[in-house]
Image (spheres, helix red, strand yellow):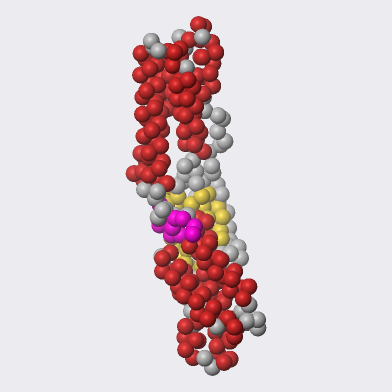
């Protein structure tokens, strides 16, 4: 929910509460009664729409995506450390179980990723008495377990493709638009009380007026660039975006941040020595941070 939508919910509640406590002032005013009751109904519809959106636990969550990348990287590093120990000990069966990389964890939906992370934890925990402290300490393994829990407990989806239902978000906007109309008519009707009951009129004006909003959030784009084979972030990848004059490059985390950017269809070209050029079509939405995952193939 945006800041302006939150402000409208707060305004609606304030207007309804004030009119409810001052019914005697307008008990014979049919017009004001009509729009007061209409505001109550439309506000309730908006509440129900917002509740339906909040129940959508499959929508993309940037924080969950960040946690997934973090815990999968940790799992890959711990597995590599364990492999070194198992090779040294000649433990072929254990080596087979631990011989997994970043992609083994990351390139799947959250359910599969979570199960694979937990399985790796079980393998390492079973042999922690042998691995600790030379290879993997008990503290490191405990931290890994906590990271898995944090990732699993974070609601939503880590997939950029999962968005809140456009039908639900559209319905919320429509419901709040109705409450805008209701409060506008309430303001117009309240003009008649400006002289005979100035306090009532002034309070209505205060409650119906939305607080000053900050400027609309900028439209930005974040590219997360990684190797298609091992899933690790790629540094110094240059991107040419047709909606951007400069040519930014990725940082150590494989992140390229572009701002401000015009909304709409964009063409992004990614280049890095030793890799095939990647040309991607991106759909950039206005007033939000658009995040795109980019995979690059080695030559």
- Quarter of the image where one finds residue 140: bottom right
| Residue 151, horizontal then vertical, whole percent | 51, 62
Q: Residue at x 45, y 68 (%)?
A: 114
Q: Is residue 36 above or below residue 132?
A: above
State yes or no: residue 161 in magenta. Answer: yes
Q: Nearer the viewer, residue 151 or 129?
A: 129
* Residue lying furthest left: 167
Can residue 198 be seen here? The reply is: yes
Q: Nearer the viewer, residue 171 or 25?
A: 25
* Residue lying furthest right: 134
Count of all numbered marks drawn on residues in the image:
0
Q: Residue at x 38, y 17 (%)?
A: 33
Give the prevailing secondary structure in the magenta stretch: loop
| Residue 170, horizontal then vertical, whole percent | 37, 40
Q: Is residue 59 above or below residue 3?
A: below
Q: Nearer the viewer, residue 104 or 207?
A: 207
Q: Is residue 193 above or below residue 257?
A: above
| Residue 231, horizontal then vertical, whole percent | 50, 71
* Residue lying furthest top: 196
Q: Residue at x 47, y 42 (%)?
A: 1
- Quarter of the image where one finds residue 246: bottom right
Can residue 276 be seen here? The reply is: no
Q: Residue at x 56, y 49 (%)?
A: 259
* Residue lying furthest bottom: 90
In this rendering, position of residue 85 left or right of residue 160: right
State yes or no: residue 287 in magenta. Answer: no
In this rendering, position of residue 90 left or right of residue 172: right
| Residue 31, horizontal then vertical, whole percent | 37, 14
Q: Is residue 245 above or below residue 44?
A: below
| Bounds of the magenta segment | 153-163
């Amino acid at each position: 929910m945006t800041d302006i939508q939150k402000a409208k919910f707060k305004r609606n509640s304030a207007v309804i509460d004030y009119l409810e406590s001052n019914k005697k002032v307008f008990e014979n005013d049919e017009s004001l009664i009509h729009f007061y009751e209409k505001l109550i109904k439309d506000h309730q519809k908006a509440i129900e729409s917002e509740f339906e959106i909040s129940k959508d636990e499959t929508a993309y969550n940037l924080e969950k995506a960040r946690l997934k990348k973090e815990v999968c990287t940790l799992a890959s590093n711990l597995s590599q450390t364990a492999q070194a120990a198992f090779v040294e000990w000649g433990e072929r069966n254990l080596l087979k179980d631990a011989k997994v990389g970043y992609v083994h964890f990351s390139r799947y939906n959250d359910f599969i990723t979570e199960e694979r992370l937990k399985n790796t934890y079980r393998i390492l925990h079973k042999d922690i008495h042998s691995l600790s402290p030379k290879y993997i300490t008990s503290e490191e393994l405990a931290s890994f377990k906590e990271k898995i829990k944090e990732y699993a407990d974070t609601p939503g989806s880590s997939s950029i493709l999962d968005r809140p239902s456009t039908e639900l978000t559209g319905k919320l906007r429509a419901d709040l638009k109705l409450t805008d109309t209701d409060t506008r008519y309430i303001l117009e009707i309240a003009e008649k009380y400006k002289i005979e009951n100035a306090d009532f009129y002034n309070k209505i004006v205060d409650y119906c007026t939305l607080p000053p909003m900050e400027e609309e959030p900028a439209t930005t784009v974040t590219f997360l660039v990684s190797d298609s084979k091992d899933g690790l972030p790629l540094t110094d990848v240059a991107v040419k975006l047709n909606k951007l004059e400069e040519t930014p490059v990725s940082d150590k985390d494989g992140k390229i941040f572009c701002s401000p950017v015009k909304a709409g269809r964009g063409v992004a070209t990614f280049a890095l020595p030793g890799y095939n050029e990647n040309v991607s079509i991106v759909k950039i939405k206005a007033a939000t941070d658009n995040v795109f995952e980019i995979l690059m193939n080695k030559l």
